[in-house]
Image (cartoon, rainbow, N blue to C red):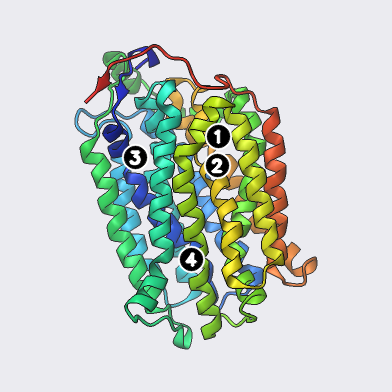
Amino acid sequence: MSNFFKPKLSFWQLWNMSFGFFGIQFGFALQNANTSRIFSTLGASPDDLPLFWLAAPVTGLLVQPIVGYLSDNTWHPFWGRRRPFFFIGAVLAAIALFLMPNSTVLWMAVAVLWLMDASINISMEPFRAFVGDKLNPGQQTAGFAMQTFFIGCGAVIASLLPTIFSEGFGVSNSAADGTIPDSVRYSFYIGGLIFLLSVMWTVFTTDEFPPENLEKFKEERKNSGGIGKAFSEIIGGFGKMPKTMIQLAFVQFFTWVALFSMWIYTTSAVADNVFNTTDAQSPAYQEAGNWVGTMFAVYNGVSALAAFLLPVIARSTSRKFVHLICLIIGGLSLASIFMITQKELLIIPMIGVGIAWASVLTMPYSILAGALPSNKMGYYMGVFNFFIVIPQIVSGLLLGFLTQHFFAGHTVKTIMLGGFCMVLAGILTLFVKDEHGVAEKVVPAPTVI
């Protein structure tokens, strides 16, 4: 469906189509804040954590372009184009979230991480294309901002859940004999339920536009040539990436090196630098894990609030300018963790990280959506996620080596390196060409109630 004929959606329609991200990020936040804690509790050493985390980006590398391609080439009168993948991914992710805290050995936790990340990606990847499908360019930034709001809200609650259970309800936070604390276990159970219900809300309250020429679409699918041609098209699309996507790829690379270092190492860095312990089964280490949940809740809460402010600033300046400033603020904030030894003060850099996170989840996708062909929106959004997972794979292979041989095992220095990478990503934003620049000008369309 062309941009000219896409009606302007109401606030509540934007709300409904984005609400599934509340559950998706609930799952991701539990994964990001607790996976290193679970691995360490089950016996993983800090040097090996990046390798075990490779399960997540490798899964994304395989799943995202395939799901994007399949959703571009799917149409069902009831389920639509993207919603079948929302549904399937949500069911599988809920199962994985129930399994993860019941891991009894390290290899089991790593295997469940593969399942969990693949399932979350099946639901998440088409959500980005969903905005491009349903919204005019003039509403796309608002659509991604609404997603960012729900990402922030879901992540805040999920990150705080272990602390809420242990301090608010007296649930055990002890990792006795290498078992996962009950506070973490119950948090994952709640996460699985919320993931499923939130995504189902979007599936059953939002419809989708059919292909512009439905008969032609059906004929093309009938003569598609099967799996061989599909694989050929998936691979061939890499050589036809829009120039804007290539420019954004460099920004994304260094941004996600920084974020991956934060997710992997914040627990061990805070435990070492603030709580003065490296024993993953000690009460102090588990307390550090809970405090990291609070820190992550802060940056996600800030991102939820900033999500609605950034588009306003972008309309007055440009999306590139907003992204540049936010990444520099986030990078300097992340690097400053190295100098902090009092736990309460760690909240301050998380505010800066939250500002950067809001922009990371909004501006690159908003810039990219205007440069993509509508009939390949899902595929190229999936390919774009390569530039999220590739830096994570590189990080997984290199960060452990750097930490051990250059930083004497002090993971807080690795996080500082990540902060400098984010600053570099901000500078590289200057070289990105934004087709729309400031606020997009589109033909007015009636609001659909």
Are the residues flagged by discs 4 and 3 in contact, CB closer than 8 Å?
no
Sequence order check, earlier mark of 2 and 3: 3
In the image, which is nearer the foreground, mark 4 or mark 3?
4
Look at mark 4 in the image and give the residue it sits on: 294
Identity of the amino acid at label 3? Ser
Identity of the amino acid at label 2? Val
Quarter in which the C terminus is drawn: top left
Distance between the alpha carbons at the discs numbered 1 and 3: 17 Å
Residue 448 appears at what percent x and percent y?
24, 23
Quarter in which the N terminus is drawn: top left
In the image, which is nearer the foreground, mark 2 or mark 4?
4
**In the image, what residue occupies the spot 34% across and 26% down?**
134
Residue 364's disc number: 1
Distance between the alpha carbons at the discs numbered 2 and 3: 17 Å
Look at mark 2 in the image and give the residue it sits on: 360
Residue 18's disc number: 3
Are the residues flagged by discs 2 and 4 in contact, CB closer than 8 Å?
no
With respect to residue 41, does 127 lie above or below?
A: above
Residue 164 appears at what percent x and percent y?
37, 71
Are the residues flagged by discs 1 and 3 in contact, CB closer than 8 Å?
no
Are the residues flagged by discs 2 and 3 in contact, CB closer than 8 Å?
no
Residue 177 appears at what percent x and percent y?
46, 88
Residue 376 appears at what percent x and percent y?
45, 25
Sequence order check, earlier mark of 2 and 4: 4
Distance between the alpha carbons at the discs numbered 2 and 4: 21 Å
* Secondary element type, mark 1: helix
**155 and 89: which is toward the camera:** 155
* Secondary element type, mark 4: helix
Q: Determine crowd level at label 4: few under 14, some 14-19, many 20+ residues with C-alpha closer than 10 A.
A: many
